[in-house]
Amino acid sequence: MRGSSHLAIGLITGVAIAGLVPGIPFSLPGIALAGFSSLAPDLDHPDSRLSKRLGFSQNYVRWAFAAGALALGAYAYLRLVPGAEQRLYYTAALAFGLIGVGMQGGSARRLALLFTGLGTVVAGLYTEQLWLSLLGTFVALAPFTSHRSWTHTIWATALWTYIGYLADQHLGWHGVALFAGSGYLSHIVADTLTKAGVRWFLPISEFSFKIPLISTGSATGNMLEIAICAGYAMLVLGLVVGHMGF
């Protein structure tokens, strides 16, 4: 299913949580969190909507390798005498430069997400917020997994919900776990409606759960996604309006 459809379903799910669950206040940030969470499983794909947003500064990865090459070359030239050690540094500088030049598209975005995630881990450790470090770990590792593998499992959904629970405990923002977990789960359920399906219980089971209605990217599939989003929105709107007593 396309990222735009996942986002729409996640936001609608957030509205359902905000409008129907007792004790959860109607919260625009909560609805936005559900939408964000609905895109998180596709961090395992470098061209997904969220990967592109979080890896927006992927060019800094190339510049980092270029800076590393210049630093190694300068050090070898200024501080080392001609010989085997200097040649080794020059070779390392050349390797860094070639890697930076050759890095394109998905590979650069994966490294950008890795560095972004690691930075978030360090921020979490520095501020003593475990949820932030776990979030950074997820962002750092997800891009290096196969698409629709471990990020599309019930275990990843539980982990994402637990991160929300820890954030709730630390920030005092009631309902974070529910908004985060339901948004994430909405992605898994939506992908179950595609012909590829989802292996919910990896690595315990390789069985792919699917209701093969949608062929992602096809004209028919796109129309079905729009219909599903519209139908889901009308259902939630009707339930929320009824719950509020209008």
Image (tube, rainbow, N blue to C red):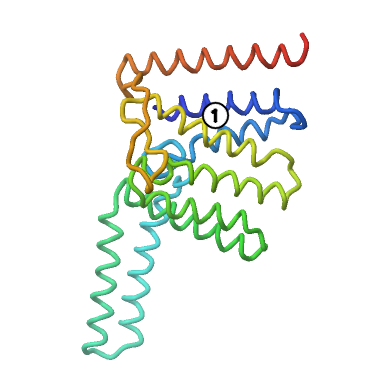
Q: Does residue 84 sit above or below 43 in this rendering?
A: below
The number of discs equals 1
Residue on which disc 1 sits:
10
Residue 67, position as x, y percentages in the image: 38, 66
Work out which quarter of the rendered image holds the N terminus and state it: top left
Residue 82, position as x, y percentages in the image: 23, 89
- Circle 1 sits in a helix, a strand or a loop, which is it? helix
Q: Is residue 29 left or right of residue 93?
A: right
Work out which quarter of the rendered image holds the C terminus and state it: top right
Q: What residue type is labelled 1?
A: Gly
Viewer-side residue, 31 vs 70: 31
Viewer-side residue, 171 vs 211: 211
Q: Is residue 5 left or right of residue 10?
A: left
Residue 119, position as x, y percentages in the image: 53, 59
Residue 176, position as x, y percentages in the image: 67, 41
Q: Alpha-carbon neighbours of circle 1 within 10 Å: few (<14), some, or many (≥20)?
A: many
Q: Residue at x 60, y 39 (%)?
A: 180
